[in-house]
Amino acid sequence: MDRAALVSELASRICALAPNPATRVAIDGVDASGKTTLADALVEPIARAGRAVTRLCVDDFLNPAESRYRRGRDSPEGYYRDSFDYAAVRAAVAAAAAPGTVVVVDGVFLLRPELLGCWTFSIFLRASFTVTVARAVARDSARLGGAEATLDRYARRYVPGQQLYFAEAQPELHASVIVDNDDFERPTIVACHKSL
């Protein structure tokens, strides 16, 4: 399946859901798995189908630095437990969820227990750490101080934090659809856990 076909298929599945109340869609996956790209791509076909669309990103709900890094800047546990204000995420999703609207939210850790009740439909982008860390180096090196610093940051904080998330929350078990996104141009739907 090419990327355009995947976007079309997922948009069709989302639009097939009853419009009332609002459809709340989570796009989850590890860092650099392609969440934001997919979320942005879904907006146009959903809107073309006649549904209002609101886009949110969990990165807009970061806790203050003193909370995010209270366990240390390299702490995997701090990354998983302290990065985001989930009460604010829930409130923003609820506020955006007007009848007939599709609220598309992308970000890490969206299928954690305290957020599961927010979603009508969820997509988990599966991608190997080998692939995602390479993408992250290309994307984040300028911001994180170069390729070596980025690799170190991912090795110490982000990858172990995601592994903690997998162990505790088992996000793939809660996803409506799992997409293998290792090959960005040829993604594959590998599982559909919840019937539509």
Image (cartoon, helix red, strand yellow):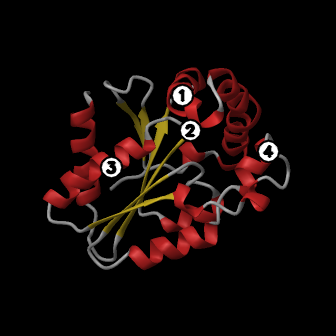
Q: Tell me the element at label 1.
A: helix
Amino acid at dot 2: Asp
Residue at the image position 28 percent from the left and 63 percent from the top: 17
Q: Which residue is mark 1?
A: 132
Across and down, in percent, residue 32 comes to: 51, 35
Q: Is residue 177 above or below residue 116?
A: above
Lower position in the chain sequence, tag 4 or tag 1? 4
Would you say 101 lies left or right of 138 here? left
Mark number, residue 31: 2
Lower position in the chain sequence, tag 4 or tag 3? 3
Inter-mark Cα distance, 2 to 4: 17 Å
Mark number, residue 19: none
Q: Quadrant of the C terminus?
A: bottom left
Across and down, in percent, residue 49 comes to: 14, 59
Q: Which residue is mark 3?
A: 40
Lower position in the chain sequence, tag 3 or tag 1? 3
Q: Tell me the element at label 2.
A: loop
